[in-house]
Image (cartoon, rainbow, N blue to C red):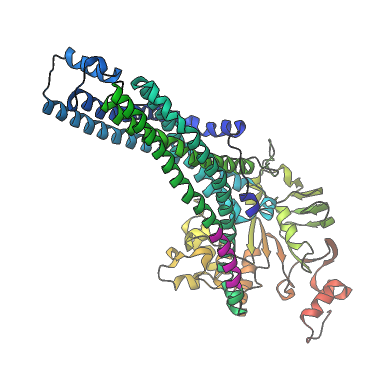
Amino acid sequence: MASEEEVKGKLYDGVLTKRLLGYVHPYIKYIAIAVPLITFNSIVELIGLNITMMAVDLYLKPIAESQLNFISRLLQQSFKLLDWNPSISEALLFFTGLYLLVVILGFVLSYLQVVILNTMGQHIMYDMRKEIFTQFQKLPLQFYDQNPVGRLITRLTTDVSSLNELMTSGFVALVSDVLTLVGILTFLFLVNWQLALAILLVLPMMIGVTAWFRKNASVGFRKVRVKIALLNSFLQEHIMGMAIVQLFNREKREFEQFKTINDEHRQVNIETIFYYAVFYPAIGWVSALGTAVIVWYGGLQILEGTLTLGALIFFIQATQRFYEPIMDLSEKYNILQAAMASAERIFSLLDTPITIISPEKPYKTTKIKGAIEFRNVWFAYQDENWILKDLSFKIEPGQSIAIVGHTGAGKTTISSLLMRFYDIQKGQIFIDGVDIKEFDLKELRQIFGVVLQDVFLFSGDIATNITLGDKNITEQNMLDAAKQVHADKFISELKNTYKSELNERGSTLSVGQRQLLSFARALAFNPRVLILDEATSSVDTETELLIRDAVKTLLAGRTSLIIAHRLSTIQSADKIMVMHKGQLREMGNHQELLAKRGIYYKLYQLQYREEPVSTR
């Protein structure tokens, strides 16, 4: 995961930018409102800088009209047109009120632009997360076999948030800073072009310090991001596995490992702090130098009568505001760079091809009987490391077929291929004589009900976990399903019965109770084909007896595949398939396979060493 977080990202990528603008386009009205607000706000801020200058030059220290700069002269002409000749106290009250009005107006404009652009950002994040989650649902299981969950969650959360920061605060600051820089420079040259040129003398130093900070800080940020990824990964793994850590007394060793990772994270943060510690004082020093140049050169001009006191005050105020956007460029660079890296990762995920899709004209299902056939099936999860080799078998409608074999023999793979979680490389798989690739994926998977060894329960109440929110399953159907698999007994003992809330993955229930709920879920959906994958291997004997009784009801009239290690659970199956190294080596009922004294016989002996083996 860390290696992917190290992606530096281009400062600008035309292709990525074009795709990002596609998300902005539906909300262009927000930008159409925000840009004028930003522009007007920059103008209002510049007006505020000019108010002090005009008050000083016109009233606090009046000067001849010929000495007034363009802006002050414009205001004086406006007063004459209005036939208003205020006293000094009236004028100062006017300028104070005007300045207060400008401040309030600036606040309102800033508030509106922040609300509008952040609202737009929330809409864009909403759309993007919907698209990413939809992609998650369409991607084949093979994709999840190869990508850690933590990395995928990062795409949906952190990376989308990085793009939001670019589209809201980053966009606002960039446009505002550019407008402010252009506006201040324009006003500076209008007031006194010689002094404006003097200010620009320190600009190369400012740019140099900013460039140094940007280069080194961005490296530090990447290091911090990598160390955070490692820290989070370590914490997630060890918190989930805390029982094992405590059981084997590994606390001290794991603490030392955590201490190392945490120390590395601290070190890279301290490195980043160093650049900030140098950058801001350096910028402050350059700004002070710029102000000193203004005071020195501006003071000389005042003595020569070519600059007014109000203009000098304006230059001092405007200079401080002029340097701020330049300082912000380093931060905006990092935001843009991080956003481009996030966009690259997100679009890489969205561009991952969906290899398992429904056909354009799917087979129209009527009533599924449940006949299954594998014909010369070859399958490998990767390259030609074959899990199944030339596998062929048939299951008649309503038959119960057990699949046994050593770990890695391909038992669970058979069920995954039936539901097209993976596509085979060679051969064909049929249901009722129709190739499963001709079915619509949704309709194909509705044929099956699956009960796994590791039951997955969602946060929510018990009723929702049985029905999964399917409105076609009535409350009575749910209650009947729970009763038939004997789940209603423990559910009725809970305080809120079927409305009882479950914690993450049903952690408050026992393994057996979770297993019974999974049986109730399978029965509630009334599948035509039932797959039991090690469904009773983790339950106690009493619960297993309840489940065995429930299974008889569950299997009645259905085609079923029972994958099991415990041979006691599959002896009543119509047929037993014995898998070995990806091949079907034996097939028959329990007594027939024992009589052959082959692989099944050996498996049976291993489980029942102390019991006499009967072949009758």
Q: Nearer the viewer, residue 156 or 447?
A: 156
Q: Nearer the viewer, residue 203 or 349?
A: 203
Expressed as whole percent of the image width and height from the top left, the position of residue 446 reads 62, 51
Residue farthest top in this picture: 81
Which segment is the magenta one?
A: 254-267
* One can see residue 549 in this view: yes
Does residue 285 appear left or right of residue 386 in this picture?
left
Does residue 272 appear left or right of residue 120 in this picture?
right
Q: Nearer the viewer, residue 474 or 217?
A: 217
Q: Is residue 357 above or below residue 229?
A: above
Q: Nearer the viewer, residue 447 or 377?
A: 377
Does residue 373 appear left or right of residue 8 in this picture?
right
Quick one: quadrant of the N terminus? bottom right
Residue at screen point 71% across, 65% down: 562
Does residue 107 appear left or right of residue 464 in this picture?
left
Expressed as whole percent of the image width and height from the top left, the position of residue 41 reads 34, 30
Main SS of the magenta segment?
helix
Residue 259 is covered by the magenta coloring: yes
* One can see residue 1 in this view: no
Q: Is residue 321 above or below residue 521?
A: above
Quick one: quadrant of the C terminus? bottom right
Q: Is residue 146 above or below residue 349?
A: below
Expressed as whole percent of the image width and height from the top left, the position of residue 258 reads 58, 68
Expressed as whole percent of the image width and height from the top left, the position of residue 451 reads 63, 63
Residue 576 is covered by the magenta coloring: no
Residue at screen point 53% across, 69% down: 487
Total numbered circles: 0
